[in-house]
Image (cartoon, helix red, strand yellow):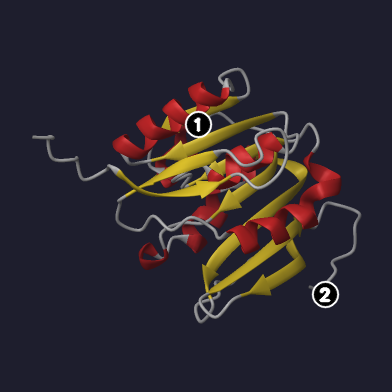
């Protein structure tokens, strides 16, 4: 008789959709609030980021399955830091990174994202992904703590419920946005950058 699976056992999969690991499946464990970005949303996002992804330094807060951060490295990002509070999810992320042979490029940090932002050394991330559990309502707190960890011309990806769009403070300027019936997703650029905001999708 097979032993019962733990609560964090994989109940689904999400695939990397582009780059050197294209088609690789990442396990999606059963965990409260875990909601990987859909293939459609990620394809749109990385089309937007295509000119900027090569060699970039990526910060993926609330990493979950790792779909965003690992997709970025698959498509040419130079390095990525994946921050995940849940111990089982962090362990699964480390296993995925090892399976991909990406330990030299990808760091997995088991930590609460807000605490990590307040305690980690300042960094120079070029792209940051912010897709927290929707029910927690953490967008404002995360945005307030990002500054020391970002390059002057960093890009910010923000995902939220379609009917609960958070206020995004200066210095962020909207570059692109899109949505589904349930989700609004948007890409912002820091005002220090020279590129003018583009409000077209």
Q: Which mark is residue 150?
A: none
Q: Secondary structure at mark 2?
A: loop
Callout 1: few (<14), some (14-19), or many (20+) C-alpha neighbours within 10 Å? few
Residue in the image at 51% along x and 82% along y: 163
Q: Position of residue 104 (x, y in %)?
A: 61, 17
Which residue appears farthest toward the left when viewing the image?
1
Which residue is more in the foreground, 167 or 98?
98
Q: Residue at x 30, y 35 (%)?
A: 87
Q: Secondary structure at mark 1?
A: loop
Q: Nearer the viewer, residue 100 or 23?
A: 23
In the displayed structure, 1 sits above or below 107; it is below
Residue depth check, mark 1 versus mark 2: number of the one nearer the observer: 2
Q: Which image quarter holds the C terminus?
A: bottom right
Q: Are marks 1 and 2 in contact (CB under 8 Å)?
A: no
All told, the count of numbered labels is 2
Please tell me which of labels 1 and 2 falls first in the chain: 1
Viewer-closest of 100 and 64? 100
Residue shown at the point (60%, 44%) measured from the top left: 16
According to the picture, the residue beneath numbered tag 2 turns out to be 200
Q: Residue furthest front?
A: 1
* Residue 148 can be seen in this image: no
Residue 164 visible within the image: yes
Q: The N terminus lies in which quarter of the figure? A: top left
Q: CA distance from mark 1 to mark 2?
A: 35 Å
Label 2: few (<14), some (14–19) or many (≥20) C-alpha neighbours in 10 Å: few
* 65 sits to left or right of 135: right
Q: Which residue is mark 1?
A: 120
The image shows residue 101 at horizontal and vertical percentages of: 57, 20
Estimate the x, y position of residue 48 in percent, counting from the top left: 79, 57
Residue 85 is situated, as x and y percent measured from the top left of the image, at 36, 41
Q: Is residue 110 left or right of residue 15?
A: left
């Amino acid at each position: 008789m097979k032993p019962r699976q733990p609560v964090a056992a994989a109940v689904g999969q999400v695939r990397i959709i582009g780059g050197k690991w294209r088609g690789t499946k990442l396990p999606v464990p059963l965990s409260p609030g875990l909601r990987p970005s859909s293939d459609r949303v990620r394809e749109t996002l990385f089309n937007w980021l295509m000119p900027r992804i090569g060699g970039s330094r990526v910060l993926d807060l609330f990493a979950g399955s790792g779909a965003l951060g690992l997709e970025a490295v698959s498509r040419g990002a130079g390095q990525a830091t994946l921050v995940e509070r849940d111990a089982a999810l962090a362990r699964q992320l480390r296993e995925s990174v090892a399976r991909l042979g990406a330990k030299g490029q990808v760091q997995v940090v088991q930590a609460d994202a807000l605490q990590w932002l307040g305690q980690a050394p300042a960094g120079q991330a070029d792209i940051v992904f912010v897709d927290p559990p929707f029910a927690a309502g953490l967008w404002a707190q995360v945005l307030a703590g990002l500054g020391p960890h970002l390059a002057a011309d960093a890009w910010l990806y923000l995902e939220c419920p379609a009917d609960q769009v958070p206020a995004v403070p200066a210095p962020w300027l909207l570059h692109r946005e899109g949505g589904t019936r349930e989700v609004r997703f948007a890409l912002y650029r820091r005002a220090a950058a020279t590129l003018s905001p583009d409000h077209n999708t």
